[in-house]
Image (tube, rainbow, N blue to C red):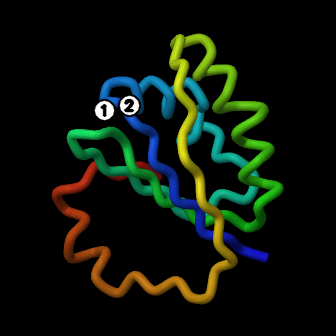
Amino acid sequence: MPILMQMFWEGVKPEQYEKLHSGSEFDSNTPKGAIFHTSAFDKNGMHVVDLWESESDFNAFVEKRLMPVVKKLGIKDMPQIDIYKMHTARVPGYNKISSGIKQTA
């Protein structure tokens, strides 16, 4: 069953996110089950919302690809993660707002 994953990672800055993202090869080798990924930052840290085909796909990505990069970068704190069964996914305005947002295929 598809899931929505919400993450808050206190203290993680955009530069660290970019290293985590590239080091996990999320764009160059899309993880099994990944549907959608977005990130944002505030003064407290990083916020991520993902859609995945299943919780097990997300957990496999975290264990096999994300955590090795976290260790390599020396990030000590762990994120707060909430997972919900998806009900709907609608993105009617994405093309309107995406022109100013970093996109990858």
Q: Is residue 58 left or right of residue 39?
A: right
Amino acid at pointer 1: Pro
Placement of 81 over or under 45, stated as above or below: below
Question: The N terminus lies in which quarter of the figure?
Answer: bottom right
Residue 28, image x, y percentages: 57, 37
Q: Secondary structure at mark 1?
A: helix
Amino acid at pointer 2: Val
Res. 34 image quadrant: bottom right
Nearest to the observer: residue 67 or residue 33: 67
Placement of 46 over or under 54, stated as above or below: above
Q: Residue at x 31, y 75 (%)?
A: 94
Placement of 44 over or under 11, stated as above or below: below
Q: Which residue is mark 2?
A: 12
Q: Residue at x 28, y 82 (%)?
A: 93
Q: Is residue 6 left or right of residue 1?
A: left
Q: Which residue is mark 1?
A: 14
Nearest to the observer: residue 19 or residue 71: 71
- Alpha carbon of mark 1 to alpha carbon of mark 2: how far? 7 Å
Residue 82, image x, y percentages: 60, 60
Q: Residue at x 77, y 65 (%)?
A: 54
Residue 50, image x, y percentages: 54, 60
Q: Residue at x 28, y 40 (%)?
A: 44
